[in-house]
Image: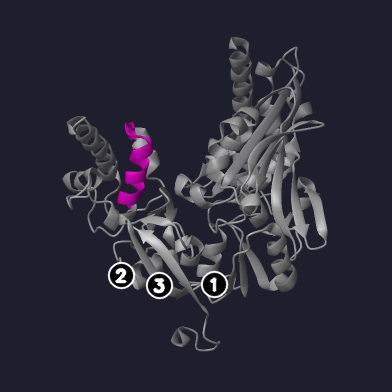
Amino acid sequence: MKPSGFAYHRPGTVADAVALLGEHGPEAKVLAGGQSLVPLLNMRLAAPAHLVDVNRIDELDVVRVASVDAGQVVRVGAAARHSRVEHDPLVHAALPLLRQALVLVAHPTIRHRGTTVGSLAHADPAGEMPAVLALLGGSVTVRSQHGQREIRAADFVTGPMTTSVRADELVTEASFPVPPGRTGSAWVEVARRAGDYAVCGVGVLIAVDDDDRIRQARAALVSMGPVPVVVDLTDAVGAAPFDQADWAAAARLVTARVEPDDDIHATAAYRRQLAGVLTARAGRGAVDHAATRAEARARR
Amino acid sequence: MTAMTPTGPAESLHEVTLTVNGVPRSASVPARRLLSDFLRHDLGLTGTHVGCEHGVCGACTVLVDGETIRSCLQFAVMHDGAEVTTVEGCARGDGELSAVQRAFGECHGLQCGFCTPGFVTTVTAYLDQHPDPSEAEAREAITGNLCRCTGYQNIVASVLRAAQLRREEREEAPG
């Protein structure tokens, strides 16, 4: 189908964009990559009177690894494409989790156009990016005519396709903190077709001590409810050396914790089983990743 | 335009200029004109096919500034000034079919042909970046495009054959 008519705005600066959002507020939607919004418009599930196209705001077309007091953070501006984040060598060296998850976001053709911040703002329960932000304890920066504020990941997604961003605010940037020390991560999914929405997706991030014990382990799950589910696995995997961690126990913990729903793609019981199986698989993947990174560091 | 919006005021029009297959082309369109419809209706370039119109099937894939995108998920007005390559621009400069197009013919990589424009643009861009794919990589390269006829086997064969033909073309090229 075709979208209904709208007034098109293409501001050149963030100031102009937030002025438009301030003026049109709930009648406006922000248009970035359009890979989620335009299907909704084409199917007339949404019919905003105004679209504010942020694709040509140069100050939003930013991907960088920045140093902050607490270490490093990957900052991604609202006009930056998934593919740019995915292929940036500095981002990948600092935070491999981003590429691990991004390669599972639809297909390369979608990632050429879709934006990472757009995925966050869209807040699809099957979306990887809100779960990555939650797993890392990141944040987004939003701006309006009245100023700027940070929203922590835990306070950002409030429901399916719903965030705490107000109608007059623009998400300008996402901040993905780089976990300090020795870490490993992995992201695994089961989908009906390659690139399709995950029936279940799990990312696991581990931090390893100098004596090879897991100091911290966390999982983030998608398609397991209205918002990303983050589970602390540290106690479950035990204090054993990281290559002997008890991922079966972690799987049991996650299986008990998640509350997925039935839908046409899978039953709740199947999703819950997947959550456990994929947690163990991602956990072992994160261990392998930590070991590989340690070897790479030793070779340098 | 009023005929398209019987209940509302006439939509304001935007002058959009694209360089399509090397030729500057312009039209005045409402903001909601999809890039796919701009190419087909306003420019008469009907090689780009529209299947699902919500970004799933890949039939409408074109190249914008050298990268594959779904033209049904973009508004033409967003791309004012861009360089677009459609399936009509995938043939060789001398009018002969490109290696990708010949490979699809040789390997029976199409039956009804509806999805083929999206495959040709996708595979052309993919081989520019990955000139020597394995069979698994060839299969991965086309996961974003749906075909309801072939069962994909012959499309994977076409990707591999196209890579081979392109290698031969490079070897034959003078200098």
Q: Secondary structure at mark 2?
A: loop
Q: Amino acid at mark 3?
A: Ala
> What amino acid type should be assigned to the residue bearing mark 1?
Arg
Q: Nearer the viewer, mark 3 or mark 1?
A: 3
Is residue B63 visible to the viewer in this orientation of the structure? yes
Residue annotated with mark 3: B27
The magenta segment is: B119-135
Q: Which residue is mark 1?
A: A44
Looking at the picture, tell me which residue is in the foreground, A27 or A194.
A27
Few, some or many C-alpha atoms within 10 Å of disc 2 (few <14, some 14-19, many ≥20)? few
Query: Which quadrant would residue A289 be assigned to in this image?
Result: top right
Nearer mark to the viewer, of 2 and 3:
3
Q: Which mark is residue B44?
A: 2
Q: Does the magenta segment cover residue B56?
A: no
Task: Tell me the kind of residue under disc 2.
Answer: Gly
How far apart in space, not on screen, are marks 2 and 1 (Cα)? 26 Å
